[in-house]
Image: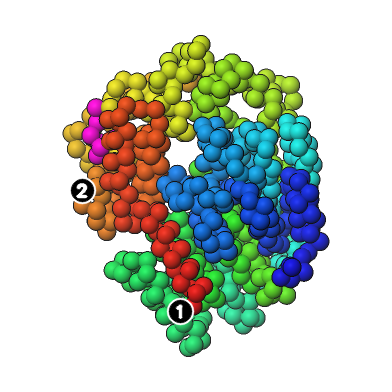
């Protein structure tokens, strides 16, 4: 029996799923797509079948693991590269990369799984990672059906027709355009709050740029308080800006005495249970938190973000300043959403927001079952954004999902092992091929042929299949050639466990720092070797017209990983490096993921042992993602029991 009345689109999707169809659901943020996924899981458990739930980011994977573990005790596992808990469970949460890897490397592990749920399926058009979603759909086993969820897929018919063209099973679409909680839009311009786009346009051109007045955050927040429009999520597009804006609110009190006492009790309980006593963040941030203000971004300790998120969901954070990752899938709605700007910085400079990005973030306004309406506030500076861009972002059609198919070396190695030259038949099954004209298709196929020729000439493949170097690299998605060459030379096999950890760190790290710290003579020597090797690989890639080129090594965090291994003092690592805690942990955890891949691959026993030992050297304290997730699950259980 349903706990409450389902919306028509939810009923339609669930009916199709129970009839055995694969289903693509496109519905606004907050409309209730997760409930459909929960019905798939409930039905599968009842029928003794297994389910895979994939998410685009680890934070969302972790949240789903906790949520589903609470709903389906003892039946849920998670595998994300740096975490592997109960991997044989009937419900497995995965990042999409791990699911794709299973399809290529060990499809037998999926024989007992009847469904895969793709959350945020529109990630298929992400430039860097979109190919993973596309490959997952192409390689989907015939015994599995899927549920794909997205806030918006404007070209959903094209997307579904492509899937129908490559798979024999039927696919249904379910589209819901109406939000359960309507949104109202406001603009802060010349430090005035304007209640319509018409008013904004009227004043926009009447104000010469030399007379632009600053939009004061305190005045915007005052308006929110006076009109009972808290809690609010305030999106800013840099970590530093989030923190600076939060501290502008220092001294402002947003909590009642009763709420403040509840926050204190909850905060110190979480600090104690998560082992955060003595952390700098706790002492520095508590004065903000006890007034109902917080900031949240990828640079924070994962457990600090966990504390903020739990306090926010309990209604004890009234104003949170955060980057856009907070909008991605994580269930953290508020009454109001504020945009610091409509322009964001990327690796290639600044650009206006895409319509889909804006809708994803704005969709966090209005809590279903709590608010009758949601409110979206946009700070407008005419020096940053044009009126044309404002019209496009607010009123334009969301961008169509476009293929970013660019098969990795590891994917090609795995496919070559299975199909030989026949793998070239995979490309015509891609969404890229489906969307492209004749010229684009020719280029797509040529890129794959070029990569195969490169892999053959560099000694990764031969007529009979993969060489030993090819088998080694087939498990190292993203780092195939540099680690493959080091393996082929016997370099990795000669390293001690700690040295292997440092080399892997240099390969996987992506830091924001340009100036290197002081390196030991040994690390200088290794850096020289790796720099020369990468340049050699990039020359091969240019020769075969393979783009994008392999990334260069980054030694910035290497000395600090060495410090972590030797002393296990995270405060020292943070202070010595000057890098945000979250960035350090993210890179160290990536080291763990790659070392695990090496240790579980086809390698000599000595290298396997070194890789697993190196992994354990890093996997400790705040870097240990499994321990962190287990503690969070225990807390969830305690709270639910209470």
Quick check: 446 above or below 156?
above
At a point 31% along the width and 69% down the height, the residue shown is: 277
Secondary element at tag 1:
helix
Percent from the top left, x then y, of residue 494? 24, 27
Q: Which residue is mark 1?
A: 263
* The one of 108 and 537 positioned closer to us in this rendering: 108
> Which of the two discs, 1 and 2, labels the residue nearer the N terminus?
1
Residue 379: quadrant of the picture: bottom right
Crowd class of label 2 (few under 14; some 14 to 19; many from 20; radius 10 Å): few
At a point 46% along the width and 63% down the height, the residue shown is: 633
Instruction: Please identify the quadrant where the N terminus is shown.
Output: bottom right
At a point 28% along the width and 27% down the height, the residue shown is: 493
Percent from the top left, x then y, of residue 588? 35, 46
* Left or right: 382 as drawn, with respect to 399: left
Based on the picture, tell me whether residue 20 belongs to the magenta stretch.
no
Q: CA distance from mark 1 to mark 2?
A: 38 Å
| Residue 489 disc label | none
Examine the rendering and report whether any part of residue 443 can be seen.
no
Give the main secondary structure of the magenta stretch.
helix
- Point out the residue furthest to the top here: 463
Based on the picture, tell me whether residue 495 belongs to the magenta stretch.
yes
Secondary element at tag 2:
helix
At a point 64% along the width and 36% down the height, the residue shown is: 140
Percent from the top left, x then y, of residue 519? 22, 39
* The one of 385 and 97 positioned closer to us in this rendering: 97
Q: Which residue is mark 2?
A: 566
Instruction: Verify CB contact (< 8 Å) between mark 1 and mark 2.
Output: no
Visual colour scheme: rainbow
Which segment is the magenta one? 494-500
């Amino acid at each position: 029996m349903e706990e409450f009345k389902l919306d028509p689109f939810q009923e339609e999707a669930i009916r199709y799923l129970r009839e055995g169809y694969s289903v693509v659901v496109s519905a606004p943020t907050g409309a209730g797509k997760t409930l459909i996924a929960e019905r798939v899981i409930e039905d599968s458990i009842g029928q003794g079948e297994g389910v895979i739930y994939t998410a685009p980011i680890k934070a969302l994977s972790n949240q789903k693991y906790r949520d589903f573990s609470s709903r389906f005790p003892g039946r849920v596992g998670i595998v994300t590269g740096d975490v592997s808990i109960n991997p044989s469970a009937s419900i497995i949460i995965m990042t999409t990369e791990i699911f794709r890897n299973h399809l290529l490397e060990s499809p037998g592990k999926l024989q007992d799984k009847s469904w895969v749920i793709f959350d945020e399926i529109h990630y298929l058009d992400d430039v860097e990672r979109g190919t993973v979603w596309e490959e997952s759909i192409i390689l989907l086993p015939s015994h599995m059906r899927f549920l794909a969820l997205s806030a918006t897929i404007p070209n959903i018919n094209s997307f579904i027709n492509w899937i129908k063209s490559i798979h024999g099973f039927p696919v249904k679409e379910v589209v819901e355009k109406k939000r359960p909680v309507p949104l109202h839009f406001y603009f802060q311009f010349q430090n005035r709050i304007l209640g319509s786009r018409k008013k904004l346009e009227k004043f926009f051109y009447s104000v010469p740029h030399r007379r632009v007045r600053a939009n004061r955050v305190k005045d915007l927040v005052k308006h929110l308080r006076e009109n009972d429009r808290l809690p609010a999520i305030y999106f800013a597009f840099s970590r530093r800006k989030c923190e600076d804006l939060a501290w502008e609110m220092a001294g402002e009190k947003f909590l009642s005495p009763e709420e403040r006492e509840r926050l204190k009790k909850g905060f110190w309980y979480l600090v104690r249970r998560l082992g955060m006593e003595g952390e700098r963040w706790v002492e520095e941030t508590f004065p903000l938190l006890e007034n109902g203000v917080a900031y949240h971004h990828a640079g924070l300790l994962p457990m600090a973000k966990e504390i903020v998120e739990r306090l926010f969901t309990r209604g004890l954070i009234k104003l949170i300043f955060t980057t856009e990752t907070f909008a991605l899938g994580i269930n953290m709605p508020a009454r109001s959403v504020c945009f610091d700007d409509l322009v964001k910085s990327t690796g290639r400079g600044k650009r206006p927001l895409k319509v889909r990005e804006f809708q994803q973030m704005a969709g966090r306004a209005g809590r279903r079952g709590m608010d009758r309406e949601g409110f979206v506030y946009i700070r407008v500076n005419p020096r940053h954004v044009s009126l044309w861009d404002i019209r496009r972002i607010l009123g334009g059609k969301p961008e169509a999902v476009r293929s970013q198919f660019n098969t990795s070396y590891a994917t090609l190695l795995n496919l070559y092992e299975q199909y030989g030259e026949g793998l070239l038949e995979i490309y015509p099954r891609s969404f890229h091929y489906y969307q492209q004209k004749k010229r684009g298709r020719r280029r797509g196929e040529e890129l794959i042929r070029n990569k195969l020729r490169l892999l053959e000439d560099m000694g990764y493949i031969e007529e009979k299949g993969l060489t030993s170097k090819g088998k080694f690299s087939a498990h190292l998605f993203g780092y195939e050639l540099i680690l493959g060459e080091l393996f082929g030379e016997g370099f990795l096999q000669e390293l001690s466990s700690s040295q292997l950890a440092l080399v892997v760190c240099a390969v996987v790290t992506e830091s924001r720092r340009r100036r290197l710290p002081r390196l030991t003579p040994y690390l200088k020597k290794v850096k020289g070797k790796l720099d020369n090797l990468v340049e050699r690989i990039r020359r091969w890639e240019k020769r075969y017209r393979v783009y994008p080129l392999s990334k260069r090594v980054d030694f910035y965090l290497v000395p600090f990983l060495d410090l972590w291994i030797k002393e296990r003092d995270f405060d020292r690592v943070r202070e010595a490096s000057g890098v945000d805690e979250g960035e350090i942990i993210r890179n160290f955890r990536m080291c763990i993921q790659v070392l695990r891949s090496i240790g579980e691959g086809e390698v000599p026993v000595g290298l396997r042992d070194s890789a697993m030992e190196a992994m354990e050297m890093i996997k400790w304290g705040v870097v240990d993602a499994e321990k962190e997730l287990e503690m969070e699950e225990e807390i969830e259980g305690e709270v639910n029991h209470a």
